[in-house]
Image (cartoon, rainbow, N blue to C red):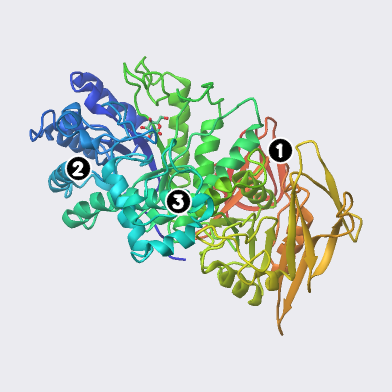
């Protein structure tokens, strides 16, 4: 396999983070010391300029970049590359004073005052003009700097704006989408209900909190529009950078499963996917293992947006954050564990927010590699340095890829639609968690699983699980049918195929769009259970699953019934079915699980699907997580122990890149230990 190194000039992993020298320009001694400490900690990259606008351009049109040039030069002379951000994530005060349209309007129709960050109007022509000017200047001045690795667009793009400019663009967006025919929109949004018909596009307002909140189509299009609008803003930044520096890759830092933006729609504009990971380590709700497995899912979401190259962990804290309800320290060893988990999941970088703690303002107590003491004599500094050393030891892994033959469909439009549907119970819908729990169950079996949208190309997978796929995009049903007819093992659940992409219900039986034929069932009713209610389902071999929250009542057409309900008025009716699609050499299967059971109870069904698909599983001790990257020189198996005592993993063979030793048979992992086995 070809090596897909993100940054060949670096020759391995990036280890770095957000660096804010503009806060220390009056302390050259500290800036000097930073370089020494960075080298000591094995840092080879710094993300500069994320929030530097008011230093770059203290008054309108008066630009100062000399300080940045000096710092980039010095870093580069010392083997430290630069990721340079565009500064649009926060605006100088003069800009808002001169151009109030740059300030966002909230869903209560109130314009923000100046302050904070990440709160500009995405549509404001003036803001775009100002951003474009400064981006161009940065690109012209630094585009050829040998230390420049990449552009970091803005920072954590997010939020919504309800200002008049955005509202008008929303109307234009809708007019385009519905062919300038308001009756098409009225039909798609079912506006005759409650007499909500519109006569023209200019009557449509965004879904203000105190406005129209009863049209699901409006809510959904507003979400789609916000993604479109944010993407459009990002594209104006990318356009100027690509015009001046086509050779420099661009990224923007995503935030986990950030609800308001469909990142998949933005991914296509970016050369590399990067994200900021801040799990609530050691919280009082769950074991570390659960926190880590959820983070593994987040990594998989990011990785799956560009399967053909590694992604980047753009930010993580070396110790603690300052914005969680309780800002607990990462326990000794956990920094290494979390950093290598990112690498195991396909990241070619481990980066931090932040290099050095600032003295004042809201992030003064956020974790950093260097604290207010300013020395290397700290636990955090030592742990970061250890990661620096480890990344060098495992450098051959950089550029290799995670390859999955199973996929989980997790769809942003579907998330929005499920949550907005006036149905089921808002307390227990839990679409995200349902998907995450299933994904984790496969992970515990040592199976790599991509996380993809419902219009993804499924031909590369042999197992696909599509939980609660309530909304079907135009292509989705055909995609699923083709997958099964081609021998794929597919599993869908209750609440599948109720609505189309406008959120109009399918007529003629759920799951719609031809999926009743694919699964051989019709879902006649769905029962929402109270949190204390339980039902059970029993398989032919006597296995039982407990049912909670949701139970659909099925009519079976031509599927095999694998399990039936044990209680209530639908006792004895089908709860799990399978329809087979045999061809000469393979047999596709469409499983339908009509009720909610925990993912661990569903394991036996997952195992059957994996076995039929010819995918192997691994026997792992409960606290051990496993992931594999495939490179041109070998396969790299990562074993990570999230438990608080040492464990042994059997059946391991190869060379441990961290210890340099050979492992034949049994691998011993200490508490929070990690091994990277090449074979
Ligand atoms: C991120 C942000 C950083 C910093 C960090 C603190 O969301 O991009 O600038 O604020 O959080 O955890």
Q: Is residue 528 depicted above or below 454 in this figure?
A: above
Q: Residue furthest top?
A: 373
In primary-sequence order, the first of circles 2 and 3 is: 2
Residues under labels 2 and 3: Cα distance?
A: 31 Å
Residue in front for this viewpoint, 344 or 359: 359
How would you rate the neighbour count of disc 1 (Cα within 10 Å): few for under 14, some for 14-19, many for 20 or more?
A: many
Left or right of residue 41, residue 104 in this image: left
Report which residue position mark 2 lands on. 131
Mark carried by residue 658: none
Report which residue position mark 3 lands on. 218
**2 or 3: mark nearer the eye:** 3
Which quarter of the rendered image does ligand 1 occupy? top left
Q: Is residue 629 depicted above or below 278 in this figure?
A: below
Q: Residue furthest bottom?
A: 584
How would you rate the neighbour count of disc 3 (Cα within 10 Å): few for under 14, some for 14-19, many for 20 or more?
A: many
Task: Give SS at disc 2.
Answer: helix
Q: Position of residue 21 (x, y in %)?
A: 24, 27
Report which residue position mark 1 lands on. 647
Q: Could you say which quadrant of the image residue 118 lies in? A: top left
Residues under labels 2 and 1: Cα distance?
A: 53 Å
Residue in front for this viewpoint, 137 or 573: 573
Q: Position of residue 56 (x, y in %)?
A: 16, 33
Left or right of residue 25, residue 206 in this image: right
């Amino acid at each position: 396999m070809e090596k897909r190194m993100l940054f060949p000039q670096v020759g391995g992993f990036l280890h770095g983070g957000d660096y804010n020298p503009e806060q220390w320009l009056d302390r050259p001694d500290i800036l000097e010391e930073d370089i020494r400490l960075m080298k000591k900690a094995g840092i080879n990259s710094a993300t500069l300029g994320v929030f530097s606008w008011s230093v770059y351009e203290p008054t309108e049109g008066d630009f100062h970049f000399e300080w940045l040039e000096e710092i980039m030069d010095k870093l580069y002379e010392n083997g430290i590359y630069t990721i340079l951000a565009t500064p649009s994530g926060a605006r100088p005060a003069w800009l808002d004073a001169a151009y109030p349209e740059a300030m966002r309007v909230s869903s209560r129709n109130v314009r923000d005052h100046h302050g904070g960050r990440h709160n500009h109007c995405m549509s404001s022509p003036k803001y775009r003009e100002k951003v474009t000017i400064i981006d161009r200047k940065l690109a012209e001045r630094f585009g050829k700097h040998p230390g420049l690795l990449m552009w970091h667009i803005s920072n954590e793009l997010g939020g919504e704006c309800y200002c008049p400019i955005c509202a008008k663009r929303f109307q234009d967006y809708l007019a385009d989408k519905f062919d300038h025919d308001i009756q098409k929109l009225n039909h798609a949004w079912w506006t005759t209900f409650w007499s909500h018909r519109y006569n023209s596009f200019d009557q449509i307002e965004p879904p203000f909190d105190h406005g129209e909140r009863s049209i699901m189509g409006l809510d959904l299009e507003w979400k789609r529009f916000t993604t479109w609008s944010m993407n459009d803003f990002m594209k104006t930044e990318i356009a100027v950078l690509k015009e001046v520096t086509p050779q420099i890759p661009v990224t923007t830092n995503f935030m986990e499963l950030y609800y308001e933006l469909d990142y998949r729609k933005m991914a296509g504009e970016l050369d590399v996917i990067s994200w900021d990971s801040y799990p609530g380590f050691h919280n009082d709700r769950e074991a570390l293992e659960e926190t880590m497995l959820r983070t593994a899912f987040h990594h998989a979401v990011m990785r799956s947006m560009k399967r053909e190259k590694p992604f980047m962990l753009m930010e993580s804290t070396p110790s603690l954050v300052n914005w969680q309800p309780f800002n607990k320290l990462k326990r000794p060893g956990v920094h290494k564990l979390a950093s290598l988990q990112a690498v195991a999941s396909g990241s070619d970088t481990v980066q931090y927010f932040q290099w050095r703690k600032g003295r004042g303002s809201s992030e003064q107590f956020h974790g950093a590699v260097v604290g207010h003491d300013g020395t290397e004599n700290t636990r955090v500094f030592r742990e970061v340095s250890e990661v620096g050393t480890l990344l060098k030891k495992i450098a051959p892994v950089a550029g290799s890829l995670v390859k999955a033959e199973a996929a989980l469909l997790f769809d942003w439009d579907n998330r929005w639609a499920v949550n907005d549907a006036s149905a089921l119970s808002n307390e227990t819908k839990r679409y995200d968690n349902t998907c995450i729990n299933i994904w984790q169950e496969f992970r515990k079996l040592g199976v790599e699983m991509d996380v993809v949208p419902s219009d993804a190309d499924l031909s590369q997978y042999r197992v696909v699980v599509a939980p609660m796929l309530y909304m079907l995009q135009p292509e989705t049903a055909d995609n699923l049918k083709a997958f099964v007819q081609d021998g794929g093992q597919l599993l869908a659940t209750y609440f599948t195929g109720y609505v189309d992409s406008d959120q109009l219900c399918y007529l003629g039986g759920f799951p719609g769009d031809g999926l009743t034929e694919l699964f051989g069932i019709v879902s006649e009713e769905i029962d929402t259970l109270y949190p204390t209610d339980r039902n059970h389902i029993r398989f032919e071999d006597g296995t039982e699953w407990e049912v909670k929250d949701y139970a659909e009542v099925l009519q079976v057409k031509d599927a095999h019934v694998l399990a039936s309900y044990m209680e209530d008025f639908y006792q004895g009716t089908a709860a799990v079915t399978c329809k087979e699609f045999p061809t000469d050499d393979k047999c596709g299967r469409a499983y339908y699980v009509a009720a909610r059971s925990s993912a661990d109870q569903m394991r036996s069904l997952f195992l059957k699907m994996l076995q039929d698909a010819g995918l192997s599983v691994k026997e792992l001790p409960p606290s051990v997580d496993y992931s594999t990257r495939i490179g041109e020189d070998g396969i790299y198996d990562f074993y990570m122990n999230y438990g608080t005592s040492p464990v042994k993993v059997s059946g391991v063979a190869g060379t441990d890149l961290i210890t340099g030793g050979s492992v034949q048979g049994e691998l011993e992992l200490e508490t929070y230990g990690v091994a990277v086995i090449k074979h």
